[in-house]
Amino acid sequence: MNRNDLRRVDMNLLVIFEALMFEKNLTRVAVKLFMGQPAVSAALGRLRDLFDDPLLLRNGREMEPTVQEVAGYSLQGAARGQTAGDADA
């Protein structure tokens, strides 16, 4: 993804992505963000297309991030000055 691709990103997708990384469940994210579960699922699909990566994979009743996304999410938090425990702040 290059800089021009980032200009086309719907910032709401990043809010959904962050909630998915924390909750690891589409239905809980939908409730938390006052959305329907199909809308969260569609947003995850758009994120997967955008980043050309599965991002989160189903593991039982939860969604587990891919190895690349764990590293990327940790770097994103560090860039914002947060640690993993500060995700709610």
Image (cartoon, grey):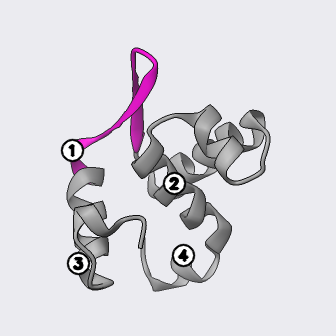
Residue in view at x 64 percent, y 33 percent: 27
Q: Residues within 10 Å of mark 2 (few under 14, many from 20)?
A: many
Which comes sooner in the sequence, label 4 or label 1? 4
- Toward the top, the furthest residue is 60
Which residue in the protein does label 2 denote?
19
Q: Secondary structure at mark 4?
A: helix
Give the amino acid at mark 4.
Answer: Asp
Q: Secondary structure at mark 2?
A: helix
Whether residue 53 appears in magenta in the rendering, the answer is no
Looking at the rendered image, the disc whose residue lies closer to the viewer, 3 or 1, is 3
Give the amino acid at mark 2.
Answer: Ala
Range of the magenta residues? Answer: 54-68
The quarter holding residue 60 reads top left
Query: Badges 2 and 3: C-beta atoms under 8 Å apart?
Result: no
Note whether 77 is above or below 53 in the view shown: below
- Residue 51 percent location from the top left of the image: 45, 56
Separation of residues labelled 4 and 3 (CA atoms): 23 Å
Query: Badges 2 and 1: C-beta atoms under 8 Å apart?
Result: no
Taking depth in this image into account, of 4 and 83 the one nearest to the observer is 83
Which residue in the protein does label 1 denote?
67
Residue in view at x 53 percent, y 78 percent: 6
Separation of residues labelled 3 and 1 (CA atoms): 17 Å
Q: Residues within 10 Å of mark 3 (few under 14, many from 20)?
A: few
Give the amino acid at mark 1.
Answer: Val
Give the amino acid at mark 3.
Answer: Ala
Numbered tag placed on residue 5 in the rendering: 4
Which comes sooner in the sequence, label 2 or label 1? 2
Query: Badges 4 and 3: C-beta atoms under 8 Å apart?
Result: no
In the figure, is residue 5 to the left or right of 54?
Answer: right
Numbered tag placed on residue 78 in the rendering: 3
Note whether 67 is above or below 85 in the view shown: above
Which comes sooner in the sequence, label 4 or label 2? 4
